[in-house]
Image (tube, rainbow, N blue to C red):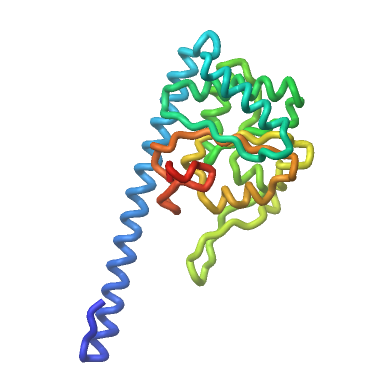
């Protein structure tokens, strides 16, 4: 910011610059949010394509991943599992098979699925149903029992306990499957990891090439370092 000799000009210039910066920030945030919504729609379309043309059986590579996931979930040393791949490679079908086997092994109530938004959660729920898997898909916020609030003084946004929605991640949950992880904010990722019990495992499913959350501009810590 330029320095002005006149005190009045300095104040006026500061206000003008601040207003311009605020408007630019709002414009950038709106643009990024629009891009994110488009990306979410593209992901939804990919879900639909996979759901309408599901593979008959798992491929050898998919079967290998499923077997390893079951080993990791049973282990007390592994708390996070990542399933990464581009749209259309069969993540939905594989996730459905993993969810089905986990439900059969640990019971339906021991497996929780979540998405980053209500729209994404409903889409995942429909995709799972198309593969014969009946499960409720909550948002990560609902799972953790938090809501996003804004500080009226500073304008800062943060997550606070939601009195109307207690956490759904109780001690009876063995596995959490988080879909559309590319849309997961770092703050929510950290809250989710902090909420885990020692014997609980999170399976993150996502595509590193999708647009990251508007608030972060980067992929969360669930992704390998080389993808961020």
**In the rendered view, does 160 fall on the left or right side of 47?**
right
* Nearer to the camera, 151 or 73: 73
Q: Position of residue 39 (x, y in %)?
A: 39, 36
Q: Quadrant of residue 108?
A: top right
Q: Hey, which residue is sitting farthest front in the picture? A: 77
Residue 135 vs 40, above or below: the answer is above
Q: Position of residue 149 (x, y in %)?
A: 56, 58
At x 67%, y 48%, the residue is 145
**In the rendered view, does 57 fall on the left or right side of 142?**
left
At x 71%, y 23%, the residue is 103
Q: Hey, which residue is sitting farthest left in the picture? A: 5
At x 26%, y 81%, the residue is 12
Q: Hey, which residue is sitting farthest bottom in the picture? A: 6
* Nearer to the camera, 193 or 107: 193
Residue 19 vs 85, above or below: the answer is below
Q: Hey, which residue is sitting farthest top in the picture? A: 56
**In the rendered view, does 196 fall on the left or right side of 19?**
right
For the N terminus, the image quarter is: bottom left
Q: Quadrant of residue 58?
A: top right
Q: Position of residue 214 (x, y in %)?
A: 42, 50
**In the rendered view, does 18 fall on the left or right side of 48?**
left
Number of marks in the rendered image: 0
Q: Position of residue 157 (x, y in %)?
A: 52, 60
């Amino acid at each position: 910011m330029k320095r002005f000799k006149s005190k009045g000009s300095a104040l006026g210039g500061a206000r003008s610059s601040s207003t311009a910066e605020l408007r630019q920030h709002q414009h950038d945030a709106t643009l990024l949010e629009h891009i994110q919504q488009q990306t979410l729609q593209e992901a939804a379309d990919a879900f639909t394509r996979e759901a309408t043309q599901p593979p008959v059986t798992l491929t050898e590579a998919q079967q290998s991943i499923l077997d390893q996931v079951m080993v990791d979930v049973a282990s007390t040393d592994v708390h996070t599992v990542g399933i990464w791949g581009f749209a259309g490679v069969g993540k939905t079908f594989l996730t459905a098979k993993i969810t089905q086997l986990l439900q059969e092994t640990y019971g339906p109530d021991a497996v929780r699925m979540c998405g980053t938004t209500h729209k994404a959660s409903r889409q995942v729920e429909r995709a799972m149903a198309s593969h014969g898997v009946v499960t409720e898909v909550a948002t990560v916020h609902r799972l953790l029992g938090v809501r996003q609030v804004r500080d009226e003084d500073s304008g800062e946004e943060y997550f606070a306990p939601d009195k109307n929605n207690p956490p759904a991640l109780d001690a009876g949950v063995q596995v959490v499957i988080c879909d559309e992880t590319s849309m997961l904010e770092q703050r929510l990722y950290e809250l989710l990891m902090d909420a885990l019990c020692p014997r609980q495992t999170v399976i993150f499913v996502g595509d590193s090439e999708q647009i990251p959350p508007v608030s972060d501009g980067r992929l969360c810590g669930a992704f390998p370092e080389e993808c961020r």
